[in-house]
Amino acid sequence: MKTNHTYASHVSVLEIDNSALEHNISYFKKKLQTGTKLLGVVKAYSYGHDAIEISKTLEKNDVDYLAVAYTDEGIALRNAGITLPILVLHAQVQNYELLLSYNLEPNIYSSFTLENFIAVAKVKNVKNYPIHLKFNTGLNRLGFTKNDVNPIIATLQDNSHIKIQSVFSHLAASEDANEYDFTKNQIKKFENIRKEFLNAFVHPIDFHLTNTSGIINYPEAHFNMVRLGIGMYGFGNDKNETAQLKNVGTLKTIISQIHEIKPGESLGYNRAFIADKLTKTATLPIGHADGISRELGNKKGCVYIQNIKCPILGNVCMDMIMVDVSQVACKPGDEVIIFDSQEKVNVLATNSNTISYEVITGISQRIARKKISS
Ligand SMILES: *Cc1c(COP(=O)(O)O)cnc(C)c1O
């Protein structure tokens, strides 16, 4: 993407380990039955990792499908030459023409979206254009209900403009063993919907329900495609699974300047840190506008220099943080690791009251992405 070139000289960088990504893809492929398709979820800039580079790797590794959230994310992939089919999970009706012209496939989740898409497909006079029907089985976010099944079948059975490529739903709590019964009920509801479509249509339809933790916890619910997101980037739903996966993203920066703060002196905005002893600090060119949450200020978060933990002192600024390097022999220009493992991402997430997903997707476009292995 253009932004990347703009910021290519930026010293804070997210390195993308391509071989780790390939390892994770093959780890999940081994969990699938022969013939089960793999869809790679590359929405939100591939969970912050660089959607184009990640998609190229997925294409090379025989992933069957890609999914993005919005039409513009799909267009960026097409403009980069990605040819895999792309499901747009939350396509908006006002973008349907654009979506068609870029050969992107919409999630159709309501009669409103279905009617609008049929109208556009007619005007454009497309034939058998693939669509994906989403059913709500308990998440209550997007989706048709069971009662919509018959009207949809009636509408689509003799429509030559569009064709059902897949029918899918999304689990609400696939990572949570306490919600096993709820999830089993979602699976059952989905199976019933599936049967109705199998009875009504002769052409092959893909059925898919599981995200990463669903793939891991509910192998009986893989149907004939799975949707792999966070797992590709190295995060399983528990420590044991995560230990089998490799970390893909490493967020690094450098030291800009070193200060010595005398007892009684303060550091940063609002004087949030007051030294009680002589404290050596390093100022780093990365801040809350880059995805370092303000929640991580005042020693709640830390970075690593020469493998030594350096707590963030005072408030996180927009473009900078200051860290305690009293214990580190370091100088301006030295390398600083924000995270280089899933464990460090998880610690940052816990300390800023969020989850790994938000930490990695929150890394701003100002941070350069750099592929480090082919
Ligand atoms: C984001 C998303 C996924 C991927 O979920 P992970 O937990 O990251 O694997 C799958 N399906 C849908 C509908 C999504 O929105």
Image (cartoon, rainbow, N blue to C red):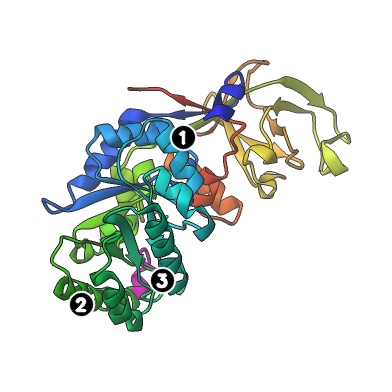
Residue 359 percent across, percent down from the top left: 54, 46
Q: Residue furthest right?
A: 264
Residue 279 percent across, percent down from the top left: 76, 29
Q: Are marks 1 and 3 in contact (CB under 8 Å)?
A: no
Quarter of the image holding residue 56? top left
Q: Which residue is mark 2?
A: 196
Please tell me whether mark 1 sits on a helix, a strand or a loop: loop
- Name the kind of residue labelled 1 in the image: Asp
Please tell me whether mark 3 sits on a helix, a strand or a loop: loop
Q: Are marks 2 and 1 in contact (CB under 8 Å)?
A: no
The mark that comes first in sequence, 2 or 1, is: 1
Q: How many marks?
A: 3
The local crowd at label 2, few if under 14, some if 14 to 19, many if 20 or more residues have their Cα within 10 Å, is some
Residue range in magenta is: 173-179
The local crowd at label 1, few if under 14, some if 14 to 19, many if 20 or more residues have their Cα within 10 Å, is many
In magenta segment, residue 172: no
Quarter of the image holding residue 77? top left
Q: Are marks 2 and 3 in contact (CB under 8 Å)?
A: no
Q: Which residue is mark 1?
A: 50
Please tell me whether mark 2 sits on a helix, a strand or a loop: helix
The answer to whether mark 1 is within 8 Å of ligand 1 is: no
Q: Is label 1 or label 3 in front?
A: 3
Q: What is the spatial separation of the Cα atoms under label 2 and label 3, in whole angstroms?
A: 16 Å
Q: Is residue 78 above or below residue 11?
A: below
Front-most of 142 and 221? 142
Q: Is label 2 or label 1 in front?
A: 2
The mark that comes first in sequence, 2 or 3, is: 3
